[in-house]
Amino acid sequence: MLLGCSVAAMGWSMLRSGAPDASVGLAVGATAIAAAGAGYAVALYRPLFRAAARTLARTG
């Protein structure tokens, strides 16, 4: 996920600075992949956070 975010940031900064190799497609595509990775990470780890919250509620 961190790699996707950094590639997206690189794409946008290249586009903003006017780099000759920059393209809107790269920036938008990398942003979409980073967002999909973040969504997948949230969906993957959500059960762990719920279980931890239940455990804390019982013991706290």
Image (cartoon, rainbow, N blue to C red):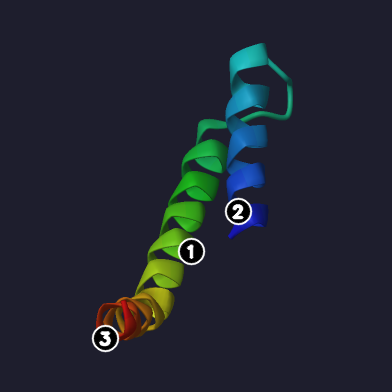
**Which residue is depicted at the point 67% across and 24% down?**
14
Look at the numbered disc 3 and give the secondary structure of its residue.
Answer: helix
Badge 3: how crowded within 10 Å, few (<14), some, or many (20+)?
A: few
Residue at figure coordinates x 33%, y 85% from the top left: 55
Check disc 3 and report the residue beneath it: 58
Q: Residue 4: give its label.
A: 2
Q: Nearer the viewer, residue 7 or 52?
A: 52
Q: Name the residue type under label 2.
A: Gly
User: Which is nearer the eye, 20 or 39?
Assistant: 39
15 in relation to 60, above or below: above
Query: Which label belongs to residue 37?
Result: 1
Q: Is residue 32 left or right of residue 30?
A: left
Q: Quadrant of the C terminus?
A: bottom left
Number of dots carrying numbers: 3
Pair 3/1: label in front: 3
- Give the SS element for disc 1: helix
Name the amino acid, label 3.
Answer: Arg
Residue 32 x/y as whole percent = 44, 51
